[in-house]
Image (spheres, rainbow, N blue to C red):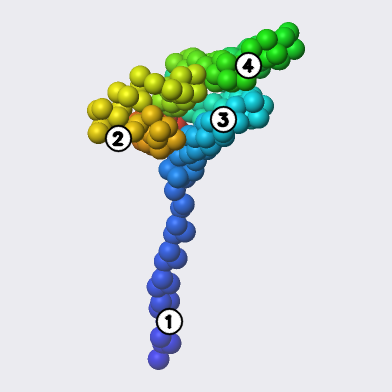
Amino acid sequence: MPEATAVPSATPAKPKPKVKRKRYQSPLLLSLLPQVVLFVSAVVLFWLSQNDMAGTIEYWEYFVAVIAAISLISGWSQSYLSNEVRAWYLIKQVIHWGALFTLLYVANNQGLRGAIDAQQYTTIVIYLIAFTTLLAAIHLDFKLFFFSLFLVFCAYLLAVPADNAVLLYIGETFGIDGAQSKTLSISIGVAVVGFIASTFVLLSMRGALLTKRIGAKRKEAEAA
């Protein structure tokens, strides 16, 4: 009798390895961290300035380096959205913040700091930081826009500590009794509002960035 031929049993197909999706963006909480650092630091410096104006001048000047570093990093995505050459973006950042560092250096070494009192000099420094940040928001990173307005608010409160028109208006508008004596509490509230507004800007930019990156990946896949 012919021998029975063995029929090989079908081997089960090996499961395909799962391909990890490449993340297109950093986590939201990590993206919010720079804004948290900026607003919290500004509130703390404002509080310290109320108690010791002369002792906080250097802290405000050091704070410029923090703002510049955050502007450099967080504005990177905006330069990608606008298809800007990265080298040109870096050059603009260096020129922008370098001009402020130079201006502060000149003010410290050409007698301006000794010519006026601590309140006036601190206010001038904060205004310079605020308007430099505002220009950075317009040209480099729009997420800094509401933070720059908050710095202007802080500078104005320090410049006019008594009978401040803005505090009177806020007190009348929101029914805050003794608004003139609640400067710190009101500044914290304004900081929270500014942070929320900055978060909306961040979310809109993240959406635009995600859309552009996905579109770029699809074009690469179609071209391959």
Q: Can you identify the residue that label 2 sits on?
A: 177
Q: Residue at x 44, y 48 (%)?
A: 21
Q: Residue 28 in the image: x percent, y percent?
A: 43, 43
| Left or right of residue 89: residue 4 | left
Give residue 162's quadrant in the image. top left
Question: Which residue appears farthest toward the bottom when viewing the image?
Answer: 1
Closer to the N terminus: mark 3 or mark 2?
A: 3
| C-alpha distance separating marks 1 and 2 | 95 Å
Indicate the secondary structure of the residue bearing disc 4: loop
Closer to the camera: disc 1 or disc 3? 3
Q: Residue 82 in the image: x percent, y percent?
A: 44, 19
Give residue 13's quadrant in the image. bottom left
Q: Can you identify the residue that label 4 sits on?
A: 117
Closer to the N terminus: mark 1 or mark 3?
A: 1
Give residue 171's quadrant in the image. top left
Q: Which mark is residue 49?
A: 3
**Disc 2 crowd, CA 10 A, few/some/many (<14, 14-19, 20+):** few
Q: Is residue 19 visible?
A: yes
Indicate the secondary structure of the residue bearing disc 3: helix
Against 202, residue 157 (above or below) is above
Q: Can you identify the residue that label 1 sits on?
A: 6
